[in-house]
């Protein structure tokens, strides 16, 4: 299992990236990790793992760089060299916590798309009350979408959820303004009809208020709506914990109450912690590409590495390819 990692991407790079890689190197069997970045900054955080090597470069794509231009001009940037490792088949998958747009551009221009997939989707796994989580796609790779794109998202999400997350016959829902058939705009109405005919367990329309209740294992939407839903969930969780902290610290009585429920509160926070779920997969590319959260700590990077390994082991990319080819053949026969 060969994983290439952009060691210089993210708010806490390279320290947290390297520490996460070291943890993975110790605990994941048969893994080989290539860290791409400034060797002088990476080596101080390494142990003596023989299954980690460093590909040295000092060039970095920052969050302020224009994604497409940066990928084309900064040929020696850590993120670009990471994608090249996959293209040249020296790595089976890659991970970056850096510039999302640049990672998408590198994925498209360097790694390439799966045949039959028009547009890749950015797909994080978000928490639910029962702890199982759900996959939301797309959350911003493409702000505009056509009905066939949502169909492809549903198929890719279903395959990933079954193969990697171990959910048998995952429930696929279409994010909409109501649960009734026929609801929504022209995009969702047409996508609804396509998803009904797809080889997936499509349960129909779902509403945003039910997402964290686990109404579906996979929720499909366009990148504009998906990004708003994602940011709303993240913002609500952060605000809720901030308000709870203020309430518990307001006086001596509430501080005493907080000390009594500290363990339970920590468990609740962990249940909503993104780091437990790894990163957001860029589904539709010719190899597994994981976008880790920009503020990822070592634990989140470790989870992202496990996620990438599961995608490789379960042949998610080739399964998506085979499914899309089968659908195309059925469509031609009809």
Image (spheres, rainbow, N blue to C red):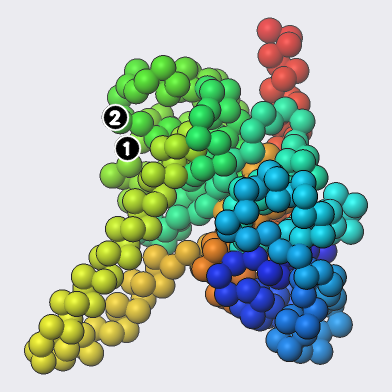
Q: Position of residue 132 (x, y in %)?
A: 45, 58
Of callouts 2 and 1, the N-terminal one:
2
**Mark 1 residue crowding within 10 angstroms, few (<14) / some (14–19) / many (20+):** some
> In the rendered view, does 239 fall on the left or right side of 321?
left
Residue bearing the label numbered 2: 178
The span from disc 2 to disc 1 (Cα, nearest Å) is 6 Å
Q: Residue at x 54, y 62 (%)?
A: 293
Q: Position of residue 180 (x, y in %)?
A: 30, 24
Residue farthest toward the top in the current orientation of the protein: 334
Q: Nearer the viewer, residue 151 or 289?
A: 289
Label 2 element class: loop
Residue bearing the label numbered 1: 207
Q: Residue at x 33, y 71 (%)?
A: 268
**Which quarter of the figure is the N terminus placed in?**
bottom right
Q: Residue at x 18, y 84 (%)?
A: 249
Q: Is residue 230 above or below residue 147?
A: below
Q: Residue at x 44, y 68 (%)?
A: 273
Q: Nearer the viewer, residue 12 or 241?
A: 12
Q: Is residue 214 above or below residue 272?
A: above
The answer to whether residue 130 is visible is yes
Q: Position of residue 282 (x, y in %)?
A: 64, 47
Label 1 element class: loop
Q: Is residue 232 above or below residue 170?
A: below
**Which quarter of the figure is the C terminus placed in?**
top right
Which image quarter: residue 91?
Answer: bottom right
Evaluate if marks 2 and 1 touch, with contact meaning CB atoms under 8 Å apart.
Answer: yes
Which image quarter: residue 292?
Answer: bottom right
Which image quarter: residue 60?
Answer: bottom right
| Residue 312 marker | none
Q: Is residue 241 above or below residue 180?
A: below
């Amino acid at each position: 299992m060969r994983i290439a990692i952009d060691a210089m991407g993210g708010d806490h790079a390279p320290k947290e990236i390297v520490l996460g890689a070291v943890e993975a190197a110790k605990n994941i069997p048969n893994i080989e990790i290539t860290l791409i970045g400034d060797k002088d900054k990476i080596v101080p955080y390494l142990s003596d793992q023989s299954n980690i090597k460093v590909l040295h470069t000092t060039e970095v794509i920052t969050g302020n760089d224009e994604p497409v231009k940066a990928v084309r001009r900064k040929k020696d940037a850590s993120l670009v060299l990471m994608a090249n490792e996959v293209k040249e088949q020296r790595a089976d998958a890659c991970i970056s916590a850096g510039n999302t747009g640049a990672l998408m551009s590198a994925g498209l221009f360097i790694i390439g798309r799966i045949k039959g997939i028009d547009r890749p989707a950015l797909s994080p796994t978000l928490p639910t009350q029962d702890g199982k989580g759900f996959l939301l796609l797309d959350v911003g790779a493409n702000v505009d979408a056509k009905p066939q794109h949502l169909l492809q998202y549903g198929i890719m999400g279903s395959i990933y959820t079954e193969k990697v997350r171990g959910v048998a016959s995952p429930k696929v829902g279409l994010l909409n303004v109501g649960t009734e058939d026929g609801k929504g705009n022209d995009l969702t109405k047409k996508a609804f009809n396509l998803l009904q005919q797809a080889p997936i367990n499509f349960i129909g329309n779902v509403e945003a208020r039910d997402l964290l209740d686990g109404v579906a294992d996979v929720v499909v939407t366009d990148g504009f709506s998906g990004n708003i839903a994602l940011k709303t969930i993240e913002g609500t969780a952060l605000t809720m914990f901030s308000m709870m902290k203020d309430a518990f610290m307001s006086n001596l009585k509430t501080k005493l109450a907080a000390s009594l429920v500290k363990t339970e509160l920590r468990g609740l926070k962990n249940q909503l912690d993104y780091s437990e779920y790894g990163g957001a997969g860029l589904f539709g590319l010719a190899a597994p590409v994981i976008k880790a959260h920009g503020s990822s700590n070592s634990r989140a990077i470790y989870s992202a590495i496990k996620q990438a390994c599961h995608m490789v082991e379960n042949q998610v990319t080739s399964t998506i390819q085979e499914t899309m080819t089968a659908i195309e053949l059925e469509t031609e026969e009809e």
